[in-house]
Amino acid sequence: MAKLCQPERVFWCNGSEAEKQLLTREAVEKGILIELNQEKLPGCYYHRSNPNDVARVEQCTFICTDSKEEAGPTNNWAPPREMYEKLYGMFRGSMRGRTLYVIPYLMGPAGSPMSKVGIELSDSSYVVLNMRIMRGWAMLLTSNSVKQRFQPRLHSMLDVNPDRRYICHFPQDNTILSIGSAYGGNVLLARSAWPCGSVRIWGAMKGGWPNIC
């Protein structure tokens, strides 16, 4: 993915407090975060999203399964091979001059056989800092609690252009690709993108879970 996206550097996240302080400081310096009054609101920062980049982007969200029926009646569908080709073309060189963050996370309680280990690759420090809040950090090399294949996630802000924005689920590959957004649930791919997308499709494929979230 680094070869595809061509970032200037790769940053392996470890979830440490020192890392949080470093990324927060960099985000403030770049104007990604605005530091609030630390006496009244210690540890609090303000983040503004692009006005064209908001929640509720169903028109940009696709379920990519072999058959349209597997995607369910309420989802947008696209063939996996066609969408992989399209998105990989958009990801090519999308991180030039940027940092690619490698974010390992644990979705669910540590030690549970139901928990899922994921790795999200992103060019957004906002994503890293928010994933710290929302998900536990996975010790991929030492954990004995999760023995299944990890859930791969790839995100790039690209140019935050709504005409080049896609959030695509590939349930049969356990993969989510998100491009062209820098907003919340569109890019925090362990959050609504995972349970509200792939989970309901897996459920439908395995026995008819409701196709709603």
Image (cartoon, rainbow, N blue to C red):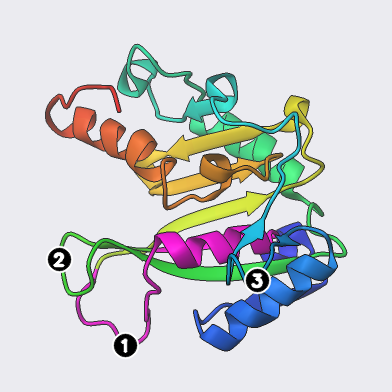
- Residue segment shown in magenta: 118-147
- Residue 38 got which mark? 3
Between the C-alphas of marks 1 and 3, the distance is 37 Å
Helix, strand or loop for disc 1: loop
Q: Nearer the viewer, mark 2 or mark 3?
A: 3
Q: Is residue 184 shown left or right of residue 9?
A: left
Relative image position of residue 102 (x, y in whole percent): 58, 70
Farthest left residue in view:
207
- Name the residue beneath numbered marker 2: 113
- Which mark is first along the chain, 3 or 1? 3
Farthest front residue in view:
40
Between the C-alphas of marks 2 and 3, the distance is 40 Å
* Amino acid found under the numbered disc labelled 2: Pro
Residue at position x 59%, y 58% in the image: 127
Relative image position of residue 79 (x, y in whole percent): 50, 26
Helix, strand or loop for disc 2: loop
Magenta segment includes 6 = no
Vertical placement of residue 135 versus 211, above or below: below
Residue at position x 17%, y 59% in the image: 114
* Amino acid found under the numbered disc labelled 1: Thr
* One can see residue 75 in this view: yes
Vertical placement of residue 106 versus 77, above or below: below
Label 1, residues with CA under 10 Å away: few <14, some 14-19, many ≥20: few
Q: Is residue 34 shown left or right of residue 56?
A: right
* Amino acid found under the numbered disc labelled 3: Gln
Residue at position x 65%, y 61% in the image: 45
Between the C-alphas of marks 2 and 1, the distance is 15 Å
- Which mark is first along the chain, 1 or 2? 2
- Name the residue beneath numbered marker 1: 142
Residue at position x 58%, y 71% in the image: 43
- Which mark is first along the chain, 3 or 2? 3
